[in-house]
Image (spheres, rainbow, N blue to C red):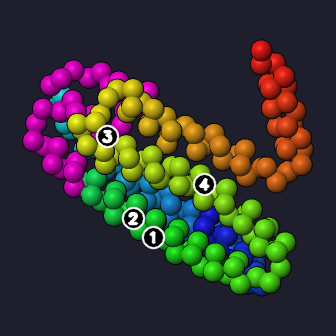
């Protein structure tokens, strides 16, 4: 998404050639392949861990830090290596997004038209907001010290990064659609007037 925004704003005349179907398929394959490799490494590693504290995870899905809490062997060091691999993969994506958005913001700030700047920012900021919410909660969930861990806090953070961004994506990206705006306005007005 950040590269698409970058090309659309910084190189609009070359958009058709840079973002053709081959480029989109290559980027999608790279994202899916990296995600698949990452999940396969973690899944294989966690399935091989012996669990000595039962097999009940107090989450709505099995997160790696929660499964590591149940492990009783020193083989979790292998999982730490995979977490480092994930962190490097995550950091690479993060740097790519930051570099893309720095270029976008520099290009937008050079635009002479106030209306053009507003349109460009309204295109980019929703994506940046969802990505920031996802990344900040995912980082917090995986890097917080065990001393401040509580089941309610862990569940809340997991819910924030696993459920909220995918739920918000269609709403945020369709807010440019007049019919969606009108329907959302009606729902909010109805909800506000129904409150006692």
Asked if marks 4 and 3 touch (Cβ < 8 Å), the reply is no
The residues tagged by marks 3 and 2 sit, at their Cα atoms, a distance apart of 18 Å
Residue 43, relative to residue 92: is it above or below?
above
Residue 121, relative to residue 75: is it above or below?
below
Quadrant housing the C terminus: top right
Which span is picked out in magenta? Answer: 52-81
Question: Who is closer to the viewer here, 193 or 146?
Answer: 193
* Residue matched to label 1: 95
User: Do we see residue 17 in this rendering?
Assistant: no
Q: Secondary structure at mark 1?
A: helix
- Give the quarter of the image for residue 9: bottom right
Label whose residue precedes the other's in the sequence (4 or 2): 2
Q: Residues within 10 Å of mark 3 (few under 14, many from 20)?
A: some
Asked if marks 4 and 2 touch (Cβ < 8 Å), the reply is no
Residue at position x 82%, y 37% in the image:
184
In the image: residue 94, left or right of residue 181: left
Q: Residue 191 appears at what percent x and percent y?
A: 79, 25
Asked if marks 1 and 2 touch (Cβ < 8 Å), the reply is yes
Residue at position x 66%, y 70% in the image:
4
Residue 160, relative to residue 57: is it above or below?
below
Q: Residue furthest top?
A: 196
Asked if marks 3 and 1 touch (Cβ < 8 Å), the reply is no
Q: Nearer the viewer, mark 3 or mark 1?
A: 1
Q: Residue 14 appears at what percent x and percent y?
A: 73, 84
Question: Who is closer to the viewer here, 193 or 75?
Answer: 193
* Residue matched to label 2: 91
């Amino acid at each position: 998404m950040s590269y698409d925004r970058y090309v659309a704003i910084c190189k609009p005349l070359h958009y058709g050639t840079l973002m053709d179907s081959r480029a989109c398929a290559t980027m999608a394959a790279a994202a899916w392949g990296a995600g698949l490799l990452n999940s396969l490494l973690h899944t294989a590693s966690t399935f091989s861990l012996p669990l000595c504290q039962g097999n009940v995870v107090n989450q709505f899905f099995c997160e790696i830090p929660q499964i590591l809490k149940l492990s009783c062997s020193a083989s979790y060091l292998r999982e730490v290596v995979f977490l480092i691999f994930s962190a490097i993969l995550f950091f690479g994506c993060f740097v790519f997004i930051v570099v893309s958005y720095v270029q976008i913001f520099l290009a937008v700030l050079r635009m002479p038209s106030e209306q053009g700047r507003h349109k460009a920012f309204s295109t980019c900021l929703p994506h940046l907001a969802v990505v920031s919410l996802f990344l900040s909660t995912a980082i917090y969930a995986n890097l917080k010290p065990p001393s401040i861990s509580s089941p309610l806090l862990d569940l809340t953070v997991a819910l924030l990064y696993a459920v909220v961004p995918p739920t918000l994506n269609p709403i945020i990206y369709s807010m440019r659609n007049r019919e969606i705006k009108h329907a959302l306005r009606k729902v909010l007005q109805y909800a506000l007037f129904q409150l006692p």
